[in-house]
Amino acid sequence: MFAIFRRKKVDTTKIVDEIENTVFEWAKQYGFKKYGRTFNRIVDKNIVQVIKFQNGCPEKGVYGVLWVNLGIRIPECADFPNELKKYYKEYECNIRCSLDEYIDKRDNPYNLKENSQKIASDIIEKLSAVILPIFDVLSSRENIIKELKNYPEFNSFRNHLADKDIDTIKAKLNNN
């Protein structure tokens, strides 16, 4: 499927660095901090919202493409709920999806042979218009309980666990 991206060698690390830095310049005004290829923003009582840049998938032989993965980590729903770290990766989140699958409804990574500024602008536009409003809605436990069902595609990687996560959050709120 991705063989077409292998024809011309590109310095994907440099290109992703450029895209990531441009997007971060925009994202930091919303409270995101940068850790490698991952941005984190802490909201209500250690809920962490994550934006992760994935440069290809070398273990599958996929190069020259970029995915932007998204997540929300709710500590009590995590495998290690009491673990406090400087930052969290997208795969440590309880609510997860990729930008392209949420917006385009299909696996549609960015082709890194295209103009990096155009890619960065497209990512910023999608994050601004669609993802930040969702992050704002899903920024507290109470809102996650009430609203997560309205965003099933936003939890596409773990939607089968959404009810369990909601029960865990409710139990946490009832114990406080």
Image (spheres, helix red, strand yellow):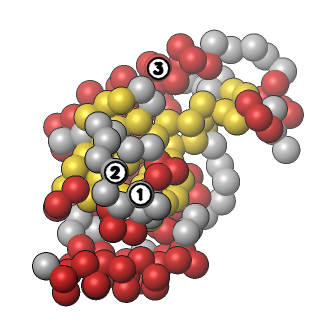
Q: Which residue is mark 1?
A: 80
Q: Nearer the viewer, residue 102 or 171?
A: 171
Between the C-alphas of marks 1 and 2, the distance is 6 Å
Residue 30 at x, y = what percent? 19, 44
Q: Which residue is mark 2?
A: 83
The amino acid type found where label 3 is placed reads Asp
Residue visible at 77% across and 35% down?
59
Residue 152 against residue 61 in the figure, above or below: below
Between the C-alphas of marks 2 and 3, the distance is 29 Å
Residue 99 at x, y = what percent? 50, 52
Quadrant including the N terminus: top right
Residue 78 at x, y = what percent? 42, 62
Q: Quadrant of residue 77?
A: bottom left
Q: CB of mark 1 within 8 Å of CB of mark 2? A: yes
Residue 145 against residue 136 in the figure, above or below: below
Residue 148 at x, y = what percent? 37, 78
Dot label at residue 22: none
Quadrant including the C terminus: bottom left
Dot label at residue 17: 3
